[in-house]
Structures are given as structure tokens and as C-alpha cells.
Amino acid sequence: MVEFISRPYVVVFLLLREVMCWYFKINNLIKIQEEQLSVQKSTQQLLEKIVWANSNEFANATSTNKAKAPTSAPKAKPSGKSFDLEKYADLMGLKIAPEILIKLTVEEINIINTEMQILKENEVIIYNTDTGMINKILRSEFQADSSWVIIEKIADK
């Protein structure tokens, strides 16, 4: 008896479900979300290609052996014609003193550059030469200290 009664309810439920999905445009929303997901995946692939191409272009511009640019640089200033942090910082548009630059890695320069992009007008990026700490503070709060220096963005970049 239960099977006989439940079969029509299942059929009615399935029919009403399709009507509700059609009425509230749920099927269309799912289709649009799937399209957006595929567009995001293709955009991510294109961005990965661009990043890879730019890293190779930078490596070709700064290295004599045409090797891929290293993801990290040594703490000391490299000698000879290896990866040039000064040129890298200049390409990023950062004004960093040479005595500070030799203490930075590529990752730290990238962090500084990223933070520079989102700075508010009254904020500055500071670097502690003793600890290697990078911080963002208000310009009015900065007090000249022998261990803290301001890292600035080059105006024309």
C-alpha cells in the first residue's frame, strides 16, 4: 500500500521540482556559474603564461646565461654578472639604497612592491636593517632611527 501511494508523490515531486527550477531560473543560474568557472580557469591559465613569460623576459634581460630568474636571491650582493637585485628593484619602481638592497631577497622586494601598490597617501613602507622586518605605518608615526629606513616608490614609475 505504501509503495502505491508513494509513487505518484515521487512523480509529482519531480515535476514540481522542474517547474520550480524553471520559474526561479535556477537552471539558468547554474549554467551561468559553470560558464563563469570555465572563463576563470582559462583566465588563470593565461595569467600563468604571462607570469612565466615575464619571468623569462626578466631573466633574459638580467642574466648572461639566459637562465630563468631565481625565485630567491642570496642575502649578500652577488658578484659578477649574475642576478642583479638593483636592476630588479628599479624595474619594480622602488627606490632602495644599495646598503639596504644587499640585505633583501627577491621575495622581500616583491612583498614591498605589492604593499606599495595598496599604500594610502599618508602611509609608508619601512624596513628594519637589524631584523629584516618590513612594516607599513603612517608617515607621521615614523621616527628616524638607525635601524629603520623608509622605502619609497620612484615617482615616474
Image (cartoon, grey):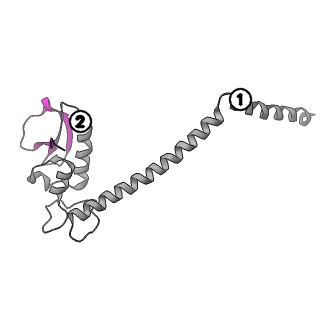
Residue for badge 1: 20
Q: Quadrant of the C terminus?
A: top left
Label 1: few (<14), some (14–19) or many (≥20) C-alpha neighbours in 10 Å: few
Residues 146 and 119: in front is 119
Q: Quadrant of residue 9?
A: top right
Residues 135 and 18: in front is 18
Residues 147 and 62: in front is 62
Residues 153 and 129: in front is 153
Q: Is residue 43 left or right of residue 136?
A: right
- The magenta region covers 127-155
Which percent across, then down, holds residue 67? 27, 68
Q: Is residue 144 magenta?
A: yes
Which percent across, then down, holds residue 123? 19, 33
Residue depicted at x 26% and y 53%? 107
Q: As displayed, is residue 9 above or below residue 31? A: above
Residue 67 marker: none
